Amino acid sequence: MSDLTHQQTGNPVAAVGSYYPWHHSAWQQIVSQQRRDRLAHAYLFTGLPDTGRHQFVLGVAHYVLCEADKITHSKACGRCRQCLLFAKGYHPDVLQVKPEEGSRAIKIDQVRQIADHVQQTSNQASATKVIIIQPAEALGTAAANSLLKSLEEPPGKALFLLIADSGDSLLATIRSRCQNVALPSPTFSDTQAWLATMSAADSDTLASAAALAPRQPFAALRMLEEGVPAWREILTDKLISLRNGEESVTEVARFCEKQPVAHAINLMTDLCTEQVRSLAVEPQSRTSARIRQLLKLQREIYRVSAQQESTSNPNLLMSLEYLLSQWQELSPGR
């Protein structure tokens, strides 16, 4: 199944044609160029995932296609025919290109179809055809070279919007034909403030979620909705109880299974790091053995984590029980 699809908004947390506060400077750059009739024909937007970069690019497409006077409007008007098409979650002049289902690569045949799309009769006379490519890193060499021809001589009136984590993995010839726009990530306070508009959780829980996904507010929101901050607090108490002999390894392992294994591994790593830092300020004669134990446990955590990410598909419960038994061995009474 081809994954060349017309614009689908489907984002419940921001209006189409809008953007998030941390992207204000980048948005003003686009608005300024549009007003001076100096838009590039191709942009490469770089930034971290889970920061609203796709919503930003949809907003650019929406703004460019909007029929309102750009001198008086710095966002899409929301009322013209083009805006109403966006509001329905579909716009025939916006094409999104991404890897096909089950694949990590954007194939050359998908790129070849872009020219066909651009040359088709537009939804509106003289309207711009917008092509959104995400992630641009998925372009293989053949696909990138095929796209290069369109970037050098854009067919018809076309605007190419590429989205990538960074431009480093793209062909230099692709990067050189795009105007690079770095999309900033939010600060910790920006993320916490935005989460407060999305959730009724208390400030401590919001802060915990923001800390779990630094500079990636959508990942933080997912963790908040999945109850990860509260789950971590409970697991922290259980790990203390485990060391005190108040809970069994199996009981704690089964609790860990309620969330992706990475959450338990990350928590144990964080707790080990905190303990190493606190011990580092104590006299070395009393703490060196303890620090060695903690560092050994961290190495085991990393090994199990790598094992979980491999294709060997190890038994999750057994892996958790092994790590927790190693954790239990760090009990002061042992």
Image (cartoon, rainbow, N blue to C red):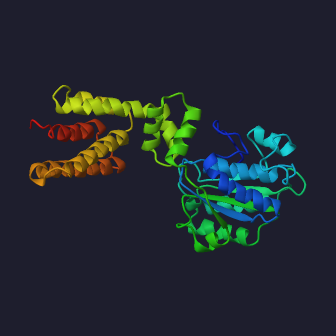
Choose top left, top right, bottom left or bottom right for residue 43: bottom right
With respect to residue 311, does 222 lie above or below?
Answer: above
Total number of numbered labels? Answer: 0
Closer-to-camera residue (179/187): 187
Which residue is the extreme one toward the top? 246
User: Measuring 79% from the left and 59% from the top, which residue is drawn there?
Assistant: 34
Choose top left, top right, bottom left or bottom right for residue 138: bottom right
Work out whether residue 267 can be spotted.
Answer: yes
User: Measuring 15% from the left and 52% from the top, which residue is drawn there?
Assistant: 292
Which residue is the extreme one toward the right? 125
Residue 309, position in %: x, y? 36, 49
Residue 136, position in %: x, y? 59, 60
Choose top left, top right, bottom left or bottom right for residue 329: top left
On the rendered structure, is 26 left or right of 117?
Answer: left
On the rendered structure, is 40 left or right of 110?
Answer: right
Work out whether residue 1 can be spotted.
Answer: no
On the rendered structure, is 218 left or right of 84?
Answer: left
With respect to residue 103, does 78 lie above or below?
Answer: above
Closer-to-camera residue (169/333): 333
Quarter of the figure that contains the C terminus: top left
User: Measuring 27% from the left and 48% from the top, which residue is drawn there?
Assistant: 273
User: Measuring 76% from the left and 49% from the top, which residue is drawn there?
Assistant: 62
Residue 129, position in %: x, y? 79, 56
Residue 233, position in %: x, y? 35, 32
